[in-house]
Image (tube, rainbow, N blue to C red):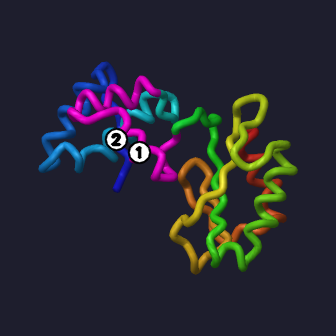
Amino acid sequence: MSTPSPTPGVSLQDEIQRMRKAYPEPLSAVLPALQLAQEQHGGWLPEEALREVADALELTPAYCLSIASFYDMLHTEPVGRHLVEVCTNISCALRGAQGVVDAFERALGVHVGETTDDGNVTLRTVECLGGCGWATVVAVDNRHRLHVQAGDVHGIVKELEE
């Protein structure tokens, strides 16, 4: 599923209503509507965004929050301009994911779940990025990097600083 992109000058409510027509029931439009709201709200879903989606789909904000808090690609807290996610599932764990996480923490000066002081990078671990055959997998701004090792982290961080 690709992330929907907002149309310039069109309200979130109007975008969701337009998108809703492509789905048989409002519940099936929740995930794409939340993705759209997240994009329009600076990369995360504040309460206001959850209310907008809920109103547009005639659902409750609590229901939208339950969906948003389940999926790793949806963020209920602010994130940095760049998002670094390290897979820590079994395949990646066996191929050195913890060393990669440790290297990112040292290079960025933050712990998992934190954002750098300048707001540039948020570091997260995720359960699976779907690349078990290419472990360790790291997603940088939703673009997967394969076979990442701790020694690769400095170069990745340098790219994010540029």
User: Residue 109 at x, y = what percent?
Assistant: 85, 43
Q: How many marks?
A: 2
Amino acid residing under circle 2: Tyr
Q: Which residue is mark 1?
A: 66
Q: Quadrant of residue 152?
A: bottom right
Numbered badge on residue 93: none
Element marked by disc 1: helix
Q: Nearer the viewer, residue 92 or 76?
A: 76
Label 1 crowd bin: few (<14), some (14–19), many (20+), radius 10 Å: few
Residue segment shown in magenta: 47-75
Marks 2 and 1, how far apart at CA: 5 Å
Q: Is residue 67 above or below residue 87?
A: above
Amino acid residing under circle 1: Ser
Q: Which residue is mark 2?
A: 63
Residue at 31% in and 39% down = 33
User: Residue 15 at x, y = what percent?
Assistant: 25, 30
Q: Is residue 10 above or below residue 102?
A: above
